[in-house]
Image (cartoon, rainbow, N blue to C red):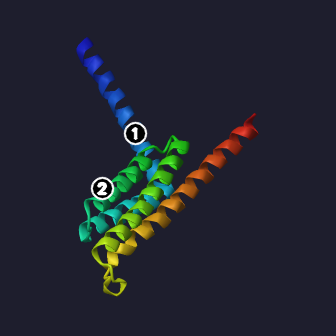
Amino acid sequence: MLRAWTTTIVCNALLETLTFHLYLIIYMWQRKQTIFLLLAVILAVVTLSSFFYSWEQFALLILAACCNVITVFLFRNRPLQTTLCSISLFVYLGWYVALALYFRQETPDASQLQLPWSAVLPAVCIILTFMARKAIQADEKLVRDSNRLRR
């Protein structure tokens, strides 16, 4: 009898915990910065799958995509989210620097330069990450203002 009772309590506790985490995940997906960051990750993966010229570019895109994914799941720590978005922005810019350095070494004549269409996608990722960063900052300002009004 006691064993069945404790099993029921443990099952109920696990169900409540699962429900709470499911609520947090659903809440997380409703934020617009989550959509922006996930679109940036998808575009980075598309860029990786279509082309890369050097391992430095590959590593930079992987790093930026990982920063964006981590940022999505740190939705309770908005200052850290802002910092990770800034890091991701600099990594995307570093990708373009690495691309320019690669083409400078490989093709000295600029008229022979042929870029694929997916070379534009990291620029779209920069825009999406910047929009997510602005939305995170707006959320943080809203929370600070509401805390100030409560006092």
Q: Amino acid at mark 2?
A: Ala
- Mark 1–mark 2 CB contact (< 8 Å): no
Residue ID for mark 2: 59
- The type of residue carrying mark 1 is His
Q: Name the spot of residue 1 as percent of width and height, x first.
A: 24, 13
Evaluate whether residue 104 shows in this view. yes
Disc 2 on helix, strand or loop? helix
Q: Residue at x 48, y 45 (%)?
A: 75
Q: Which residue occupies the extreme top position in the image?
A: 2
Relative to 117, is 85 on the left or the right?
right
Task: From the viewer's perspective, tell me whether residue 117 is left or right of residue 150.
Answer: left
Q: Is residue 14 left or right of residue 135?
A: left
| Residue at the image point whose x is 38% and y is 63% from the top | 95
Residue 1 visible in image: no
Looking at the rendering, in which quadrant would you find the C terminus?
A: top right
Disc 1: which residue:
21
Q: Residues within 10 Å of mark 1 (few under 14, many from 20)?
A: few
Q: Earlier in the sequence, mark 1 or mark 2?
A: 1
Specify the label residue 145 is tagged with. Answer: none
